[in-house]
Image: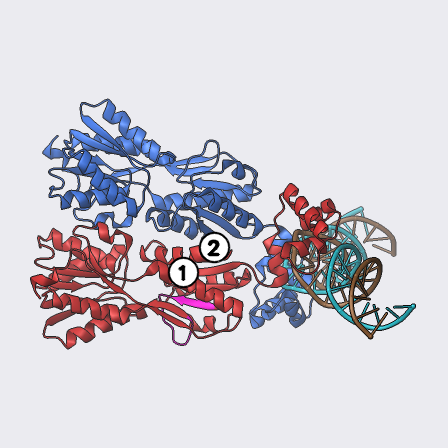
Chain colours: A blue, B red, C brown, D cyan
DNA sequence: TATATATCTGTAAACGGTTACACATGGTGA
DNA sequence: TCACCATGTGTAACCGTTTACAGATATATA
């Protein structure tokens, strides 16, 4: 391993001078600078971030917490965050929490021990007390804890749009799938849809589910058609559940969208490749990840903890699990 | 921030003693041990990993390189690796390379600068020369560079199985989709299938593609049916392409599996939720990730660079894009 | 010419841990 | 009683950086 001392020796200067050219601080003669750069080149030197981090008490690492990278929505967010962080030369330590408080605490401790300079959390803020005494800024992504910096999509409006589109396109016995109780964004979607459904002239059922996972989605879908066999429109809590519902509907011989309309939530990558392609409420996940990263960087650089909450708009992506509006309007 | 010195003071001992109880090295009197533990408790002390890493020249971080976390196959691998690493108290720094040599180099440099203790790479070994002079062990995952530790699935056998199942189930004008040219695992699948197809009494077409992404998959699918409209069986290069093919087949009015059989590769989470559910060659992705982590840990702990190549078996997952065998056998 | 200021560089002390080494004590066997 | 060893603890050097401080020289200002 080549250190700053090797460079100093090769360039015939002290380590302080090398450090100065590295960081572009203080005065260094142009000729000296050139010699140092030459030495760096020829030795392929690059500074040890660990030593830097120790002295500065800040690394260039940021922590990223997410429930489960295996759920296709989160990689989109993570990728957005990562791409933006990379542009600013920050790197990411990540952890899957499975919405498990112990794992969450473990990772947060790791982040502290590694001098991370900030953190993006997509977890369900299980241990809010921990978050409060952190020595680095945190941005919540796809989550909306009160009074803390966050980036999220307008779930409530998404729910409203889904319900309106469903009604506009002729469904009259709508099933509204309510996602996991503990997740605020799921609640928002539900509330928004409920609001519209309640005040409209339609019948509707509410079905509660407790997870968003692939494993369980099939089960919810089966349960749905057992309980509400006559439903003619499903507003799913997310695209995974919607995918399962579409699957089960087709399996039981329903014609989509003639017999049954389906609207998902998220616009996960595979949605457009389903058949029929899934109509859904799109969250701009990649952009959300980028925004979270930008916000975090601002907080880091200003060193002041503004309360900033960025709400990004959702949009209805009309594909083919919903009917054309002129067929009924 | 509370340091080892604070603990030492609180416990009335020297930092060396605190360090000794922390690491369970050397002699420490039981009473002293208790006092130190009490001090640690009451101060909520946890050691700074950065300082440790600097002295030891080894962190507890491992680097993880993958092409794109947004592709649903990779999160499975990553999750397996992460879960195993977590058990051993290692943490992960990760980077998306997009199969781009510059990003790859950047991340590898970051890993070095942060004293990572090892690395798992799922990239297409673009810059093999870099990998050679690394100061930490590397395990390749889902990639098979010659003579380097790696964990991968038996792609060739997977290709053979896919072709055999296709033929056994009655397809006679088979289209074999060849994945990106630069990717060894894609080549293996192709070779395996080609081998069986060549020696069987069937017609087949080969269609070359240059990526595995969602964005492009639709295009490949359209191209396929334009060029080989009469094909009655598609062996796709992976599940994403298979999903697109299924979509396009359904869209163009084909009946699956009666008119056309489809076999994918990977067994990505959404495969079973497609309709009809996708028959595919399963790679044990999560287990592969775990195995890679285990292998890396072994390499780290033995400190000797065995050449170990772990090949995991693939399996045919019979779902509904293929016909039942007794219908034809 | 004297003094202030800008430029350039090096020495050494941090940062928060780990560990080599030294030293002290007490017990054991000869 | 002496030599030896196991036990217990502290001092200080070290890991690879950054930076406060000091010292040297050159240039500008009065």
Residue at mark 1 to residue at mark 2: CA–CA distance: 11 Å
Q: Secondary structure at mark 2?
A: helix
Check the residue under mark 1 and report the chain it is in: B
Number of numbered discs:
2
Question: Does B59 appear above or below C4?
Answer: below
In the rendered image, residue B309 lying in the magenta stretch gets the answer no
Question: Does A146 appear above or below A303?
Answer: above
Question: Magenta region: which residues?
Answer: B138-149
Q: Main secondary structure of the magenta part?
A: loop
Question: Does A294 appear above or below A202?
Answer: below
Counting residues from the start of the chain, the first of labels 1 and 2 encountered is 2
Q: Which residue is mark 1?
A: B290
Q: Position of residue C13 (x, y in %)?
A: 76, 54
In the rendered image, which quarter is residue A4 located in?
bottom right
Q: Which residue is mark 2?
A: B86
Q: Position of residue A86 (x, y in %)?
A: 45, 54
Q: Residue at 19% x, 31% y: name it.
A: A174
């Amino acid at each position: 391993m080549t250190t700053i001392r090797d460079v100093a020796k090769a360039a015939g200067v002290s380590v302080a001078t090398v450090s100065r050219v590295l960081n572009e601080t203080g005065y260094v003669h142009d000729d000296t600078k050139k010699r140092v750069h030459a030495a760096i080149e020829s030795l392929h030197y690059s500074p040890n971030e660990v030593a830097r981090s120790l002295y500065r008490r800040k690394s260039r690492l940021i922590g990223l917490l997410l429930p489960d990278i295996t759920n296709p929505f989160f990689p989109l967010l993570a990728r957005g965050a990562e791409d933006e962080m990379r542009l600013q030369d920050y790197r990411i330590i990540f952890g899957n929490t499975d919405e498990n408080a112990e794992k969450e605490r473990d990772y947060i401790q790791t982040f502290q021990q590694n001098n991370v300079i900030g953190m993006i959390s997509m977890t369900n803020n299980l241990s809010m007390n921990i978050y409060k005494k952190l020595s680095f800024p945190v941005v919540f992504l796809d989550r909306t804890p009160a009074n803390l910096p966050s980036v999220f999509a307008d779930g409530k409006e998404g729910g409203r749009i889904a319900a309106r589109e469903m009604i506009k396109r002729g469904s009259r016995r709508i099933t509204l799938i309510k996602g996991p109780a503990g997740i605020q964004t799921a609640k928002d979607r539900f509330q928004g849809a409920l609001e519209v459904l309640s005040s409209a002239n339609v019948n509707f059922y509410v079905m509660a589910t407790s997870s968003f996972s692939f494993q369980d989605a099939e089960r919810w879908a089966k349960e749905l058609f057992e309980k509400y066999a006559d439903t003619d429109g499903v507003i799913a809590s997310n695209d995974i559940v919607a995918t399962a519902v579409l699957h089960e509907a087709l399996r039981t011989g329903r014609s989509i969208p003639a017999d049954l309309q389906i609207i998902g939530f998220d616009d996960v990558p595979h949605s457009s490749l389903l058949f029929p392609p899934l109509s859904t409420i799109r969250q701009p996940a990649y952009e959300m990840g980028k925004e979270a990263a930008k916000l975090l960087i601002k907080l880091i650089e200003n060193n002041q903890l503004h309360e900033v909450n960025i709400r990004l708009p959702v949009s209805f992506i009309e594909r083919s699990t919903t009917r054309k509006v002129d067929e009924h309007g």
